[in-house]
């Protein structure tokens, strides 16, 4: 049997920390091997030694090194080597028998050995894993792999962020929330008219900025929890309940749930307006803005806000603040959504303002002439044969 | 263009488009100058008239664009003194390519389109990358909205595979009015989906009688 050291190409994908390759309880390979020497594969770092097949041994496999002592007196140590290939002429993994012949490439043999080792290790590990209790929350097991991929040049898939302007203010009868309607994926607008004001309870609404999936998920989850709480207590939900649920959830995820929220509502204790940050901190304010357009909107609020606004004044101010974000911030745009919450009544004014109509529509229209799209190949599959197969099934059932 | 760590350059966004016709050339660029998520100004011209029948539009880093425009204007002036005539569009195209490649190892961060009429009076459009590789084409788009615009222009202007139909001429058979209409519509569409494109679009039409300019409003959000 020939003894093959690793090809560097394959070793790259199995690093020192690979548990299948370098398990803490590595066993030495059995010494009886009667295979023929491998054919000439003279590529680069692979060396082939022909020697007495009965006299080779693996000395250690646990520290990232494989020392191979062939029948001859030469021994070679290589860091990060793959283990010995082909202890026997056929390898049995599960139900399958992989046969190694003289035409096998080195890669085949290396892979077979890897598979065999892996099958053994998996069986052993399964016994240990079965005892571990299941845990909820995020599992950070793949972080190391992700880092390795990043170093290799792979890019992580991007999230869709909303790049937003959201605002809230307290007026004489309650709370008014406002939001723009643009969702961006980097520099591209993914949704021109999305909804950023989320329902929490009949008297509580929440605007969300940050990663769209996070704001949706977190508000849906807290909304469900509030409803269950309402059934349990038989009372209207309070804004601070929603606030506490949100902040404790976000804090426990240490800022990884990227949701920046403006929570507002009116309950038995009065009107409330809060902001919630992704790390879990909160503020209670008479007027608040969040998102990439928050500075533009806050500029409007700081100059025009006063206590005790009427409903119409409040709606006008909120719309102005959102418009300021829409026109001055590139991450916000399209339309203005407004939500007015008062004691006993909520009005959701979807698309309260549409200040951005499309400026030009071609009167010519577009022709898509036949022949403009090249057809490279055509394949027609008659369906008749499928009908026959169905008839056969029926016959068997009878 | 992610140049976040790159203090020497800045991407000011924007889109330019040019279409060549049988006896005219349309060049257009939006007028928004932005950085990050903010707008610097809504009224910035990215188009520069280099010669009588030769106009350049660029998107990218406007600081480099200003320097490039001055550079070309100076070289053009010298040419006029030496040859007693204006530079033709293909000659200016070569000059621009050489100027860009001269700074191969500290490039002008500009994505240029040159448009005009060649010596026969036919429309010509030359499209460039940042370091001077150029090609004469029938139409082109550069900038942040280019990815949204080029597929539409390909569909409307490009001849399909010569295997199916005989190849069309590089210049489009569209009339001048139709080409301007297409450019306006294509900009309005790009504005809907690209945050860096908007405010206004400046459209220049170059034909035998001179250069005509038009300004169209776009979405300001």
Image: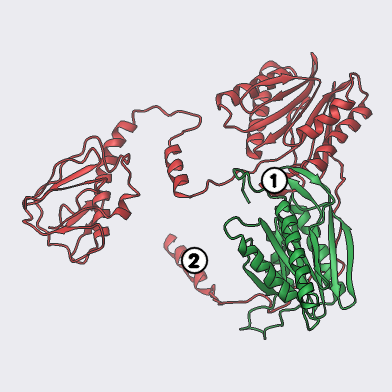
Chain colours: A red, B green
Coordinates of residue A169 in the picture (x, y in percent): 83, 25
Q: Are marks 1 and 2 on the same chain?
A: yes
Are there few (<14), some (14-19), or many (20+) residues within 10 Å of tag 1?
Answer: many
Which tag, 1 or 2, sits closer to the chain's start? 1
Write the residue at 50% across / 69% down.
A386
Write the residue at 82% across / 73% down.
B53
Residue B65 in view? yes
Q: Is residue A256 left or right of residue B152?
A: left
Quarter where residue A80 is shown: top left
Q: Which mark is residue B206?
A: none
Q: Secondary structure at mark 1?
A: strand
Q: Is residue B31 left or right of residue B1?
A: right
Q: Secondary structure at mark 2?
A: helix
Q: Which mark is residue A184?
A: 1
Q: Nearer the viewer, residue A165 or A86?
A: A165
The residues tagged by marks 1 and 2 sit, at their Cα atoms, a distance apart of 48 Å
Tag 2, which chain?
A
The relative height of residue A299 versus residue A121 in the rendered view (above or below) is above
Tag 1, which chain?
A
Coordinates of residue B154 in the picture (x, y in percent): 70, 70
Are there few (<14), some (14-19), or many (20+) residues within 10 Å of tag 2?
Answer: few
Find out whether the residues at labels 1 and 2 contact each other: C-beta distance under 8 Å: no
Coordinates of residue A335 in the picture (x, y in percent): 82, 43
Residue A230 in view? no
Please, which residue is most extreme toward the bottom here?
B166
Q: Which residue is mark 2?
A: A390
Quarter where residue B28 is shown: bottom right
Quarter where residue A298 is shown: top right
Write the residue at 89% across / 65% down.
B213
Numbered circles on residues, count: 2
Q: Nearer the viewer, residue A308 or A236?
A: A308
Q: Is residue B75 left or right of residue A312?
A: left
């Amino acid at each position: 049997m020939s003894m093959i050291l690793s090809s560097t190409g394959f070793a790259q994908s199995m690093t020192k920390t690979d548990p299948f390759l370098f398990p803490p309880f590595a066993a030495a390979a059995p010494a009886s091997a009667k295979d023929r020497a491998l054919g000439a594969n003279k590529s680069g770092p692979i060396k082939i030694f022909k020697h007495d097949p009965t006299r080779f041994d693996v000395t250690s496999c646990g520290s990232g090194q494989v020392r191979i002592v062939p029948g001859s007196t030469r021994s070679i140590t290589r860091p990060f080597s793959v283990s010995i290939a082909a202890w026997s002429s056929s390898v049995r993994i599960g139900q399958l028998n992989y046969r190694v012949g003289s035409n096998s490439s080195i890669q085949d043999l290396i892979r077979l050995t890897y598979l065999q080792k892996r099958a053994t290790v998996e069986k052993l590990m399964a016994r240990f894993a079965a005892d571990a209790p299941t845990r909820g929350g995020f599992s950070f097991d793949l972080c190391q792999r992700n880092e390795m991929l990043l170093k290799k040049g792979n890019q992580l898939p991007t999230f869709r962020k909303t790049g937003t302007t959201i605002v809230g203010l307290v007026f004489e009868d309650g709370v008014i929330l406002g939001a723009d309607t643009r969702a961006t994926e980097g520099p591209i607008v993914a949704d021109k008219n999305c909804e950023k004001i989320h329902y929490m309870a009949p008297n509580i609404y929440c605007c969300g900025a940050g990663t769209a999936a996070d704001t949706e998920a977190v508000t849906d989850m807290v909304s469900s929890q509030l409803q269950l709480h309402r059934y349990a207590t038989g009372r209207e939900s309070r804004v601070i309940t929603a606030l506490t649920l949100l902040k404790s959830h976000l804090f426990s995820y240490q800022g990884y749930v990227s949701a920046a929220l403006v929570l507002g509502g009116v309950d038995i204790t009065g009107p409330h307006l809060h902001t919630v940050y992704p790390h879990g901190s909160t503020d209670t304010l008479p007027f608040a803005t969040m998102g990439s357009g928050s500075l533009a909107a806050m500029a409007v609020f700081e100059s025009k806000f006063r206590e005790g606004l009427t409903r119409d004044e409040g709606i006008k101010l909120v719309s102005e603040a959102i418009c300021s974000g829409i026109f001055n911030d590139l991450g916000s745009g399209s339309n203005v959504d407004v939500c007015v919450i008062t004691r006993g009544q909520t009005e959701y004014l979807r698309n309260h303002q549409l200040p951005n109509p499309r400026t030009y529509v071609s009167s010519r229209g577009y022709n898509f002439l036949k022949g403009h799209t090249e057809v490279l190949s055509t394949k027609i599959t008659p369906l008749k044969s499928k009908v026959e197969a169905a008839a056969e099934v029926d016959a068997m059932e009878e | 263009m992610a140049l976040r760590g790159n203090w020497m350059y800045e991407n000011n966004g924007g889109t330019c488009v040019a279409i060549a016709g049988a006896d005219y050339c349309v060049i257009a660029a939006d007028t928004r100058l932005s950085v990050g998520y903010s707008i610097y100004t809504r009224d910035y011209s990215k188009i520069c008239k280099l010669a009588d029948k030769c106009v350049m539009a660029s998107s990218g880093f406007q600081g480099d664009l200003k320097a490039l425009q001055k550079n070309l204007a100076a070289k053009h002036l010298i040419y006029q003194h030496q040859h007693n005539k204006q530079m033709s569009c293909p000659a200016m195209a070569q000059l621009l390519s050489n100027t860009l490649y001269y700074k191969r190892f500290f490039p002008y961060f500009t994505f240029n389109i040159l448009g005009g009429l060649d010596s026969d009076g036919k429309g010509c459009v030359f499209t460039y990358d940042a370091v001077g590789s150029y090609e004469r084409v029938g139409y082109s788009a550069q900038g942040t909205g280019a990815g949204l615009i080029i597929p539409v222009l390909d569909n409307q202007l490009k001849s399909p595979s010569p295997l199916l139909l005989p190849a069309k001429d590089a210049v489009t058979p569209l009339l001048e009015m139709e080409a301007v209409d297409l450019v306006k519509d294509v900009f309005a569409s790009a504005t809907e989906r690209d945050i860096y494109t908007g405010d206004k679009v400046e459209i220049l039409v170059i034909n035998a009688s001179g250069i005509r300019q038009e300004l169209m409003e776009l979405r300001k959000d």
